[in-house]
Amino acid sequence: MKKPRRGIQKPHIEDHAIDSDTVFYYIAGYTCGGAPYGVTWEEFTAQEQRESKKNTVESRLAFVSGVFKEDGVIKFIIERMNQRNDIDPKINIRKAVNDVIRYDEKFITNMDIDMQDYSNDDEIDYIMKKTGFKYELIELILWQKYIDEMNQGRWEYDTEPCIKCGSYDLRLREIEDVDFVDKIRCEECGYEMVIGENGLESFCADKDWEDYLKGQLTFPFEAEVCDYQEGNYISQGDKLRVHGIEGDDDLYGIIVSVRKGRKKYVVSLVDLKPTNLNLQGQIAISEYKGWFGQR
Ligand SMILES: [Zn+2]
């Protein structure tokens, strides 16, 4: 699972207002021999780290108590988990979400106090031990929590600027219907990107979609009708098997051939949500839908 990277907040230093050099952050004065004295960068950085550690722990504790008062993130996660059709119906989602989030906050608080680095696996292992839930369930619940944080714009991407407008105000965002992968959105111009082999690239730029999707999708795959369909044969919620791409229609976009039971039909790809398709295919469809919605 790829966990979004928290943006690094660099300390803001007003260097024009104070006298400093490469050794001293703040030069208080000079000895009679001409040597400067004051606060060195080393001392300043250590102080900054102590303060930032204190702030993180404090805000984390405030956040923990806030979660259980307002129930905001918990409510959001429960709703999202209830919308899924791949969760074991025997699982009490409300309890699972409450337990996982509570122990996750506890874990993160402990790590922050100790200033320790940790991996997603460390985090999930800890919650597994405390709750007895399966890895996959915990991973999914934590993913919904990241989505809530991404929706609030709390995950920054600060490695490269926007490839369209050059702004550095980039945030991680959810890719609709795809688990454990995120995209990058420019807050300045709204352009969406993903991290490619050579850095940022366009998320859903104009392209020959028929060709592209033929290369990305593995047929057949299963899908559910997610939009109301006019006509008598196919309706919302139907489970279909998608067999291939028939063509690209000016109005309806990419048309795919499907089977419902033993009968064959053609439907618009944008009306389908894949339910059993590999990650590469899911991303390609989400990309296409994003482009189709904006055209
Ligand atoms: Zn931009």
Image (cartoon, helix red, strand yellow):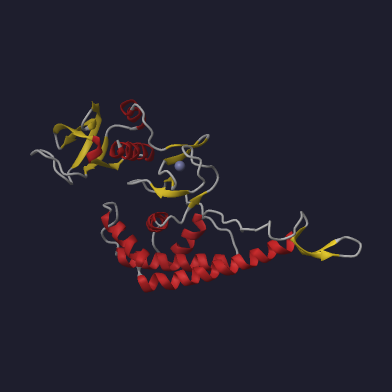
Q: Could you say which is closer to the camera, residue 78 or residue 242? A: 78
Q: Could you say which is closer to the camera, residue 198 or residue 240? A: 198
Q: Is residue 231 above or below residue 71?
A: above
Q: Is residue 48 above or below residue 189?
A: below
Say how many tags the image has: 0
> Where is residue 23, by image quadrant?
bottom right
Q: Residue at x 30, y 27 (%)?
A: 210
Q: Residue at x 55, y 58 (%)?
A: 118
Residue at the right extreme of this rendering: 33
Ligand 1 placement by image quarter: top left
Query: Is 230 on the left or on the right of 169, as rendered?
Result: left
Q: Residue at x 45, y 40 (%)?
A: 194
Residue at the left extreme of this rendering: 232
Residue at the front extreme of this rendering: 17
State which quarter of the image contains the C terminus: top left
Q: Position of residue 138 (x, y in %)?
A: 40, 58
Q: Could you say which is closer to the camera, residue 223 or residue 30? A: 30
Q: Position of residue 110 (x, y in %)?
A: 54, 68
Say whether residue 129 is visible: no
Q: Could you say which is closer to the camera, residue 13 or residue 235? A: 13
Query: Is 286 on the left or on the right of 56, as rendered?
Result: left
Q: Is residue 46 above or below residue 180?
A: below
Query: Is 204 on the left or on the right of 30, as rendered?
Result: left
Say whether residue 56 is visible: yes
Query: Is 176 on the left or on the right of 19, as rendered?
Result: left
Q: Position of residue 259 (x, y in %)?
A: 18, 34
